[in-house]
Amino acid sequence: MTHSPDPIAGLDLTDQAALGSGASFWTTKPIGTVPAIMLTDGPHGVRRQSGSATDHLGISGSEPATCFPPAVGLSQTWDPELVERVGQALGEESRALGVQVLLGPGVNIKRDPRCGRNFEYFSEDPLLSGALGAAWVRGVQSRGVGASLKHFAANNAEHDRMRASSDIDLRTLREIYLRSFEIVVRQAHPWTVMCSYNRINGVYAAENAWLLTTVLRDEWGFDGVVVSDWGAVADRPAAVAAGLDLEMPTTGGISDAEVVRAVRAGNLDAAAVTRAAGRVAQLVGRVTQTDTSAASFDIDVHHELAREAARRAIVLLKNEGDLLPLAPAPLAVIGGFAEEPRYQGGGSSHVNPTRVDVPLDEIRRLAGDQPVRFCSGTDTAAAAAAAESAETAIVFLGLTADEESEGYDREHIDLPTAQLDLLRAVVEVQPRTVAVLAHGGAVCLDAVAALAPAILDGALLGQAGGGALADVLFGVANPSGRLAETVPQRLQDSPAYLNFPSESGHTVYGERMFVGYRWYDSREIPVTFPFGHGLSYTRFDYSDLDLTSTGAGVAVRVTVTNTGDRPGREVVQVYAGLPDSHVGRPMQWLAGFASVTIEPGHRQIIEIPIERTDLAYWSVDAGRWVVEAGEYAVSVGASSRDIRLTATVALDGDEPTRPFTRESTLGELLADPVASQKILSALSDASPFGAGDSALGTNLLRMLESVPIGRMVAFSAGKVTHEQLDALIVDINTQRC
Ligand code: BGC
């Protein structure tokens, strides 16, 4: 398709406004030489609806497409390379189905386990979310299809999602809730970003000029289209002024007319409309570069990729006495999810799969000639009898589709009582019991962990999850998945417990940046399974941790040895901390990760770079990321609570040198090497408190630390004048330059 160099040059205001809103539920308008394009959900499969069956709640059907593991499963791979390949496949399917923009990935942070949509998000950690989101975008866009990074921003609950304000302090917003988006925008350059429904500190995301223009474009260099979430625009002229380019879905032309009227009334700059139209035209140019007339995809190849991703997503939470992998022996398979698997979540991301692997069938296939008895579990006595007569019982547990979905949050995080009763009855007669879990949001697992000697966590695995589970149960695949979210012992322990959901239209992010393991680890709260946890059928040892300070950050080297008897993949996690930080910081945070596959008896040196930004905090005073000078503790381990080695590295800081003023406190001056000398001698000379040197002991100084130096004039009772103080401040500032 060819476009004139400036496709909007000849368009009048009405046409330009028309380009900025949808023609239908899923398409833009063809205007002038700019053709229409189709945008569709996402993220873990293509939800391409046809005809009049259109909705964004997953109600009506859609064309068959591969259902890959939703983000909750994909994140447990900790594998950007694999996620990128899934993205490529999604891009191919989009092209084959005539879709130009796929609405994903979702990189919102899992702030609270009750959020109904957590299954669509990657993690409680921004670095992991960002790395996986960037890989997804790279994959999709490599096939000429646009990604739509969503939901920008601070959309961490479903309750009142179209009105509530996420009230967050700036530092937390930058370090946690914007950080995953920043990583994706800077690393992978998505062609669109979807602004969220909610308000942020009182301002709708769609009308938030600071968010959509100052941060997204001016700071991060985003050069694509900001599209609204479906129905997120309350005031289109205000949204266009703030930086929204495309409102979706169609408003039947109503909001186009509002834009035109606002310009004519002098309430909206015409240049903003032209800018938005230009960006939509540029997006259309980008996504129509590739010829898609002969595009198709191989259903079998993509199903195999979905199985590979699902295999890698499964987390072996517990494996007492090496119960797994299974040896050939009679089995009892119990629970309805073995026959009708739960493999995706409800709402706009709902995919019509090309096929679905049934776990029971796949287990039977790998069990060969060994008998496999199945019980749905509704009759507990029958299930216990089947379990008792088998060598091992496999019990499928989890949340049903109606217990969690887009559109509403959960009120608790417990598994249904009937399921725990079933597990208890089975374990009583069959000590060799494996629990297999399906769920989109985190569930309390204390009871399961106390009962079952082995637990496989599948979260949501997509259409090929059944085969993948069988592969792991029988050891065809060695599990290497890791939790991307902490499993707390109790909901009451979770960071946002008292501030969730919103109240009177406001959600107070009172726990600040202490989200997920940042909270549990800093407060030393016992958890059932920590962030990053996941076992293997082999074992890995860590040795020779070496840290080198580089200009760009820290180079981490560590040797990992496979000390077991089968090949395996280890996800090596690097956590950083700064015990002497002068700002409040988590005890540790994820600063890097890498994975490696090692043959038994072999070792490998892993190199993981930590970037300086991943050691920095957002300084509200300086308005930028700041690395504090100091001794950073850098640890490597197999989870946030399974730290194997720790070393320290000294880094130079880049804290801003701000001139002192009368408002600077005595403490701030004393913390500065130049100022402290001057101030100590000035204090003792002037002796403003009528005391000699000896009285200026540590305690007195500590008591005075918070006093602004300007107030010393009054405290000195005439001994120090404003002029003398100002001269001292000038002297100090001059010497520090
Ligand atoms: C969801 C988005 C989705 C859109 C289109 C909205 O309700 O929040 O994630 O992309 O609908 O279906």
Image (cartoon, rainbow, N blue to C red):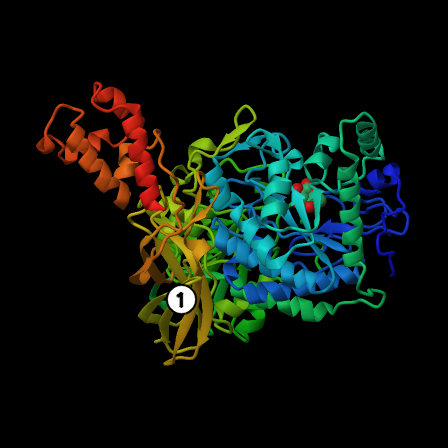
* 204 over 125 or under it: above or below: above
Taking 679 as reference, is 656 left or right?
right
Where residue 600 sits: x, y (%)?
A: 39, 79
Q: Which residue is drawn at 57% across and 31% down?
A: 165
Secondary structure of the residue carrying numbered label 1: strand
Q: How crowded is mark 1: few (under 14 residues within 10 Å), some or many (20 or more)?
A: some
Residue 84 or 563: which is nearer the viewer? 84
Where residue 386 sits: x, y (%)?
A: 48, 59
* 594 over 62 or under it: above or below: below
* 646 over 13 or under it: above or below: below
| Quadrant in which the N terminus appears | bottom right
Disc 1 residue type (three-letter): Ala
Residue 31 or 530: which is nearer the viewer? 31
Q: Is residue 196 visible?
A: yes
Q: Which residue is drawn at 11% across and 30% down?
A: 695
Q: In which quarter of the image is ligand 1?
A: top right
Where residue 5 sits: x, y (%)?
A: 84, 56
Q: Name the residue under label 1.
A: 555
Where residue 180 sits: x, y (%)?
A: 54, 50
Q: Residue at x 34, y 60 (%)?
A: 635
- Asked whether mark 1 and ligand 1 are closer than 8 Å, the reply comes as no
Dividing the picture into quarters, in which one does residue 294 lie? bottom right
Please count the marks in the image.
1
Residue 451 or 173: which is nearer the viewer? 173
Taking 144 as reference, is 453 left or right?
left
Q: Can residue 530 be seen in this view?
A: no
Dividing the picture into quarters, in which one does residue 652 lie? bottom left
Dividing the picture into quarters, in which one does residue 323 lie? bottom left
Q: Residue at x 49, y 67 (%)?
A: 473
